[in-house]
Image: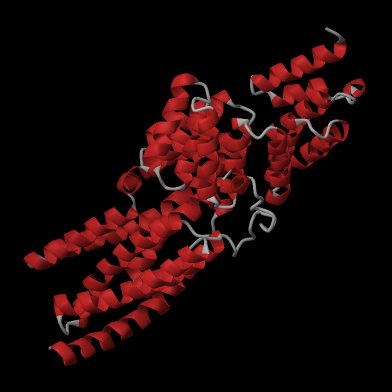
Amino acid sequence: MREDLFAPSLQDVPRLGPPAEGERPWRLGSQFYVAFFGGALAVTAIASLNARRLGAPKVAQRWILVLGAVGVIASVIVSWALFGRDLGRSVRIAHRVVAVLLAGALYKVQQRPDRVYAFRAQGDDDEQYDSLWVPGLVAALVGGLVQVGILGLGILALDAVFG
Amino acid sequence: MDATDRNLALARHYLGIEQPRRALEVLDGREHDVGDPEYWRLRATALIAVDGYREAIDAAARGLDLDPSDVGLLLVSALAHRGVGDLAAAERALLAALRIDPEEPALLSQYALLVAHAGQLEKAHRLLDEAERLDPLASHVVHARGVIAYLSGDDDAAARHADTVLVDDPEEPGAHLLRGSVLSERGSARAARRHFETAARLDPGDAEIARVARASRWATHPLLWPLLPIQRFGPAKVWLAFIALIGLTTAAGIAWLQGVVLLTYLVFVVYSWTVPPLLRRWLEWRAAR
């Protein structure tokens, strides 16, 4: 056991330096805004990119995609179950609730790598993290539009099968 | 005690009271001490404390040329390499030290913190299990345990370990920093600030701790009071509360109240996006003046 403990495990780790602007991760808390305004797809895209920037383990990155897929499917099912074919109320309420809950799960997945990153990164908050303003807005707009499309088609499909 | 011993004792004293710059002043210009590995160990330690990692690497290397099996020099060499982000070189130095003294809890703790830098938290836990087996009461082991718990997201354990260290040594800056970090994560900005400021007072030479203390003062600024719910409960719970309110007003059919909640929410969002960065910039600008 001791031999295993003393076996080198950092020899392939690339030299760590302060990442350049545009390569730094985003603050985890800001992702809730993307979830609220953009939905499950948008927050999954941002969380997935962020996990890569944090250098999160591959298994964590896969969990983000799995949770994201579950979130998108759940937002369709929850919307249809609560509001039927009323796409307006689904977009305003149901898919947002699912997206914010999903953001909570994605927060947990990213929490460890985020704390490790903050532990080793130097400088103040602004030097450690990039602003999520522009990427968050783009994700919320593009992801939100695609999500509404998925929501509409999904609701129609569920209504046709079970309605 | 000859002059060399006196110099080194004085430098050691300054390092012990967190005055690395004074230690460097004592060591500067003492060319006749350079044949002593202890001189280089103290010099490298002081340089690390003032973030002079590259010079510390050189100083440790000079000392290791004199005595390649000096565990203390290997340790400071590892810390200096870690400071410049070269984890591979830091690991080589630490493993060399552990080959010489495999049962030293301080080395095991440092190795645990090093692998934690690369996110290898499981290995860090196992290294600390081994260190704890050797000396369960060593404060650096307990402190490292707290740091790894914090990085693992186990805030309760991190707080417990920090408190244990503070009971033994209420003036341990690292434990105050850890306690403050946990409190900050939990949204207790004022209590966190007290710990960060104590850490900064106890270790005035550490620029990183000073920065954290300064940031914690900003976090308790009156303009950020409206954001206390987010600090206290986290953004997710606050947004969910708003959504629940919107849902309730919708279900109750009170359209005007729904409008008020929605408007409040939007103002709150815009405030939380714009005021904190603007306030920080303004306070930074004022501090710089």
Q: Classify B89 as above or below A92.
A: above
- Look at 49% across and 37% down and name the residue there: B145
How is the rendered protein coloured?
secondary structure
Q: Residue furthest bottom?
A: A160
Q: Position of residue A47 (x, y in %)?
A: 45, 66
Q: Position of residue B226 (x, y in %)?
A: 32, 46
Q: Left of A127 or right of it: where is B25?
A: right
Q: Classify B91 as above or below B8.
A: below
Q: Residue furthest right?
A: B32
Q: Left of A21 or right of it: where is B59?
A: right
Q: Position of residue B113 (x, y in %)?
A: 58, 42
- Look at 65% across and 35% down and name the residue there: B102
- Look at 74% across and 38% down and name the residue there: B77
Q: Position of residue B108 (x, y in %)?
A: 60, 37
The residue lying toward the viewer, choosing from B248 and B95, is B95
Q: Classify B248 as above or below B128.
A: below
Q: Quadrant of the N terminus of chain B?
A: top right
Q: Is residue B217 visible?
A: no
Q: Residue furthest left?
A: B252
Q: Is residue A90 visible?
A: yes
The residue lying toward the viewer, choosing from A114 and A1, is A1
Q: How many marks?
A: 0
The residue lying toward the viewer, choosing from B12 and B164, is B164
Q: Residue furthest top?
A: B1
Q: Quadrant of the C terminus of chain B?
A: top right
